Image (cartoon, rainbow, N blue to C red):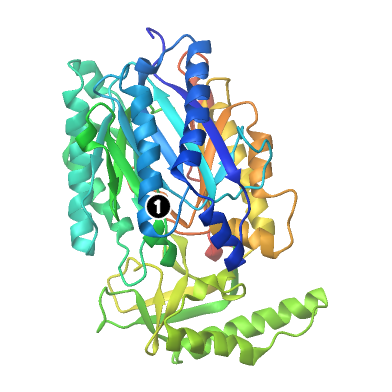
Amino acid sequence: MVDDFFLGFAAHAHTMNELETDQERELELRRRNTPEEAQKLVGMILDKLEKDLFDSGYRLEDVKLLILFLSYRGEPVEKDKLICDSILRSIENKFKKSAANQVRLIGHTTAGELENEDLVLKEISGVGYNGLSLLALVTNLPIGVGRSWGLRTAEEAGEQGREMARDAWVDFGQQTTSKEHLRMGKTLLVLTQGSKVDAPGFEHFLAEGIANFIGSTREARIMNVIGGSSGDGLNAKLFHQFYGRLKEHQQLKILDGEAVCALIPNLSEVSLGLAADGISRIGRQHMFRFDLDKKPHFKYVKRIGREDPCAKYASVIYENEARLSREKGLPKVDKKAISEIISNSRAQQSILVFNPILGRYAFAFPFGNYACVAPMRVVGEDIELILPIRSYTPEMPGYFVIGDFEKIQKGARRVHDMLRADQGFSRNDATILISCINRRVIELMAGCRSGTEAEILKEGLSSTQVIGFLAYGELSFTHLIQEPYFHALSCWGITFHSKTATTISKEKKKGIGIKGWIKGPAEE
């Protein structure tokens, strides 16, 4: 590996690939989940991974980092944990005889995957419940990994962001004796679990802590910070994260509500793509007033303008649905039904975003570019957001927005074009794609069975090895935690380039990057 700083290999397998809305069908799917079936999938993926390495002249001991995306979930929690544990043990057994001590594992469960080469189904649907994706980073440089210990307040999340980045930097430093390695550019990959019902979500405040660490540690030179979260709302209770050194059993852990990051060396030449404009703004700007008597602050909307938030929410949705029905020649929507959905949410503490109509709508608040935040449920007289927004005053201007499937598909092409325009693709590149599951839900609700985002991305990136996942929400931090910041309805990708297979000219790199490609609702 004299000339190779980085090489990526990916493998993917599913046993089921549908987004189920039928509760009985989903329960039947979960009943079929077994540790034995999960281990069979893991074996297939690891065998392919080993073959890819061997065909390129490498071995398992050349692997430094494993990134695991898992959607193989069961119910109840005890069964789910048993399946997750069996998968981790299978991976550990594969690597324990040959892997070096510096090998790391990070990853988490998601809502599904975008597959490049499915080892079981050989087809695309874009959403799966029983699947496993595994990416191995092969490099002759060390890898550093850090983790948090639970996010309970905004202040604690910021502190942990600093500590997590510091731990990754220390871990990286302990793995190398070369000062040259310490001077190389770094990329920090952050995986977080989203906010849960009855628990605040402070994942985005990790960014402030990471930024503080970067600012105080000149040697770190972290070029980009990116991140993904999964499991917002009720489903977050079923999701886990994974962390550990494969040769040290006691450190191989299933985490709960925590964050993991990896410092990957010499990736200043990665390509980045982002599509965050999969929404359309509805009407004029409104002033959102937050209830500061409830904690966490900036999560509970008390008034929209001068009106009750639930009444205004129902009114805007009804008027927009009525307009869409007129334009498409569909039956008129029932205003009373929309109001009852929201009222039932208040009475039963149910989740608004699971409703087929309300699930398409969200609020957009200005964080430089407009960040989309979905309402979670009604609590008393307030609307609870899926996570607290970043604000310093009790009032903030914002908009109502709706998911737009045509913009979603246009955004998929945008992500591909950004990745290709930056540095192109070559055979040994590895691309990670992260797309919010809400984007696929909106496509399904619009009747899209072909020409979907998943198909567009796979077709466009067929020359490179690709894995990706559909998460319930994402965070994107680039350019040392500067804007843009996005949550939900976004899609982004990062391509890691093989050093020997790609030659990059300064002219081609000049002016290329994520800035300049971003549009928010306010710019339409």
Pick the front one: 91 or 287:
91
- Residue of label 1: 80
Residue drawn at (35%, 55%), measured in percent from left and top? 78
Neighbour tally class for label 1: few under 14, some 14-19, many 20 plus, Cα within 10 Å: many
From the viewer's perspective, is residue 341 above or below residue 436? below
Residue drawn at (38%, 45%), measured in percent from left and top? 84
* Kind of residue sitting beneath label 1: Asp
Residue drawn at (69%, 36%), measured in percent from left and top? 459
Q: Position of residue 329 (x, y in %)?
A: 83, 77
- Residue 390: image quadrant is bottom left
Q: Position of residue 142 (x, y in %)?
A: 27, 22
Q: Is residue 127 left or right of residue 98?
A: right
Q: Is residue 462 left or right of residue 193?
A: right
Q: Is residue 510 left or right of residue 152?
A: right
- Residue 120: image quadrant is top right
Residue drawn at (38%, 28%), measured in percent from left and top? 268
Q: Secondary structure at mark 1?
A: helix
Pick the front one: 406 or 242:
242
Q: Is residue 224 visible?
A: no
Which quarter of the rendered picture does the C terminus lie within? bottom right
Q: Position of residue 452 (x, y in %)?
A: 69, 50
From the viewer's perspective, is residue 347 above or below residue 143? below
Q: Is residue 81 visible?
A: yes
